[in-house]
Amino acid sequence: MQFQTDRNRVQGLGSAKEGVGHWWTTRITSVALVPLTLLFIFPFVNTLGGGYEAVFDTYGHPLNAIIAILFIGVSAHHLMQGVQVVIEDYVPNKGIRTGALLANTLICWALGLTGVFAIAKIAFTA
Amino acid sequence: MADVNRGNRPLSPHLTIYRPQINSMMSILHRITGVGMSLAFFLIVWWLLAASTGEEYFDTANWVLTSWIGILILVGSCFALWYHFCNGIRHLIWDTGRGLEIEQVKKSGVVTFGIAGFLTLLTIVVAVRGA
């Protein structure tokens, strides 16, 4: 039998901060990625072995470019959230964990935005 | 909640003595494939950036992606993608409260591997035809 109240047991442990926001955003991005993956992958692998011209042929088309931009952007966010949960689960040291979470956020945003920029530039110069 | 004794109870599951089962293995494989795809994601963004920069840089990136190690990473990531895709849909169905009986979980697990394998082969066929 413990005589501590619930309030007393959790005091000083920090707040949960955000409720189900993270979980729900992961679901939204995963639902979005179902059609986006199907629409992105097949034109992409079809282009992959075709050389420089084939890239501009595929992503010069607005529909392919828009799908690719949405896929890269949403994937980057989904990847960021997934890796964040893995880091939080498996890295117990607070300093290393904070550093890893920081690196994860920065790298995923950089990758996502770089991909979006690259596709846009290909689309506009094709 | 006030009398719950936290801290003295045995922790479960004991991963080292736990018999591997399809549901637990598929759960960890979902994480492994998810994290593993970050390498292919990086390579694809680099390949697109190279294409937007110019033909010479593109040839370098394209050479890396179509080298034997690049193809190995891409084919592995292709299965990882379709596995994560199918198992993700399985998770979304579970989120609605459906299919959570053990027998249903085992059955949907086998179906997940089947569809993921089929989509992987289909993707490779499309890639080879385009090359």
Image (tube, coloured by chain):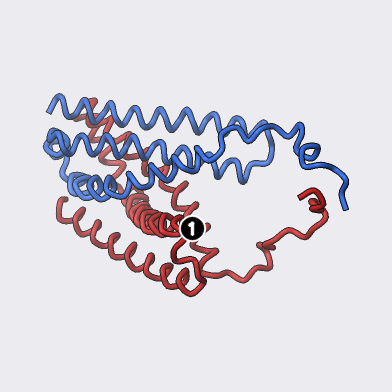
Left or right? Give the position of B16 relative to B31: right
Name the residue located 59 percent from the left edge and 30 percent from the top edge: A99
Question: What is the chain letter for disc 1?
Answer: B
Task: Check disc 1: other Cα within 10 Å, few if <14, some if 14-19, many if 20+.
Answer: some
Query: Which of the 4 image quadrants contains residue A98?
Result: top right
Residue type at mark 1?
A: Leu
Residue A90 x/y as whole percent: 62, 45
Q: Residue B5, percent across and down?
A: 81, 53
Residue under label 1, please give it: B29
Q: Is A120 positioned to the left or the right of B81 in the image? A: left
Q: Is residue B67 left or right of residue B16?
A: left
What is the letter of the red chain? B
Colour displayed for chain A in the image of the structure = blue
**Position of residue B78 measured from the top left corner of the image (x, y, whole percent):** 33, 54
Query: B24 or A18: which is nearer to us?
Result: A18
Lateral position of residue B109 relative to residue A51, left or right: right
Spot the residue most to the bottom: B103
Q: Quadrant of residue A17?
A: top right
Query: What kind of element bears circle 1?
Result: helix
